[in-house]
Image (cartoon, helix red, strand yellow):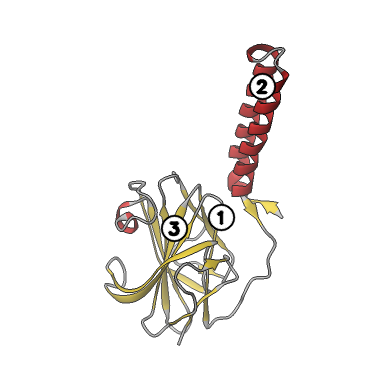
Amino acid sequence: MRFHREGNTIMLVTALILLGLNLLAYYFLFRGNQTAVIALAVVSLIAFGLVVQFFRIPKREHTLDEKLVIAPADGTVVVIEETEELEYFKAKRKQVSIFMSPLNVHVNRNPLSGVVSYFRYYPGKYLVAWHPKSSTENERTTVVIKQENGIEVLMRQIAGALARRIVWYVREGEPVKQTEEMGFIKFGSRVDLYLPLDAKINVTMGQKTKGGVTVVAELA
């Protein structure tokens, strides 16, 4: 297992703050109170562990197949429905949404290979990720990947109540490869996929997904 570069600064700052707090407690605040010093040290280790686990990148064998749409993130499937996609397609599409809790791996991956035919970033609010308006009012990105056969899939990164920054590594007009990193969302979020109406959905409501591994849909 390795850790994502987006967490380097946060992990270092957290470690320094916790170290300083524990030194302050040992020499001044709880001087002579060994129980309080040990309790603070344990709480600090747990807090640091929670921050570190958020940026972990587990080693996995990724699923690669041009006819499959692969889960772009770890999380739980919270939406499977036919809906009107109004930003890019302006037509009906099948939507699959994956909610990412703070305990999930937060790397986002390309669901398929192709060329980025459309990209937009929108600053916005920080409603809870499962709120109906989060997909149109929260901080978010919209990425459309077009395959050689002309099929397009839209992916939307949506910041949640705890998230304050979305990171992306793709640009409009550039080629991307399936399961490679396309971005990162810090501390709780959601990812939406908008698929062709004839796509066969391979996940169910409440199912846990693994980014780069779980097959979300089969393309016709």
Which mark identifies residue 36?
A: 2
Quarter of the figure with the N terminus? bottom right
The picture places residue 11, in percent across and down from the top left corner, at 62, 39
What's under tag 3, amino acid-wise?
A: Arg
Secondary structure, mark 2, is helix
Closer to the camera, 170 or 189? 189
Residue found at the far bottom of this picture: 220
Residue found at the far front of this picture: 35
| Earlier sequence position, callout 2 versus callout 3 | 2
| Earlier sequence position, callout 1 versus callout 2 | 2
Is 131 rendered above or below residue 200?
above
Q: Distance between the residues labelled 2 and 3?
A: 39 Å
Residue at 31% from the left image edge and 69% from the top image edge? 88
Is 56 rendered above or below residue 192?
above
The picture places residue 147, in percent across and down from the top left corner, at 47, 78
Residue at 38% from the left image edge and 80% from the top image edge? 196
The picture places residue 178, in percent across and down from the top left corner, at 56, 71
Is 32 rendered above or below residue 184?
above
Res 158 quadrant in image: bottom left
Residue at 36% from the left image edge and 46% from the top image edge? 126
Which mark identifies residue 211?
A: none
| Earlier sequence position, callout 3 versus callout 1 | 1
What's under tag 2, amino acid-wise?
A: Ala
Question: Which residue corresponds to mark 3?
Answer: 190
Question: Which residue corresponds to mark 1?
Answer: 104
For the residue carrying disc 2, how many other residues have a C-alpha within 10 Å: few (<14), some (14-19), or many (20+)?
some
For the residue carrying disc 3, how many other residues have a C-alpha within 10 Å: few (<14), some (14-19), or many (20+)?
many
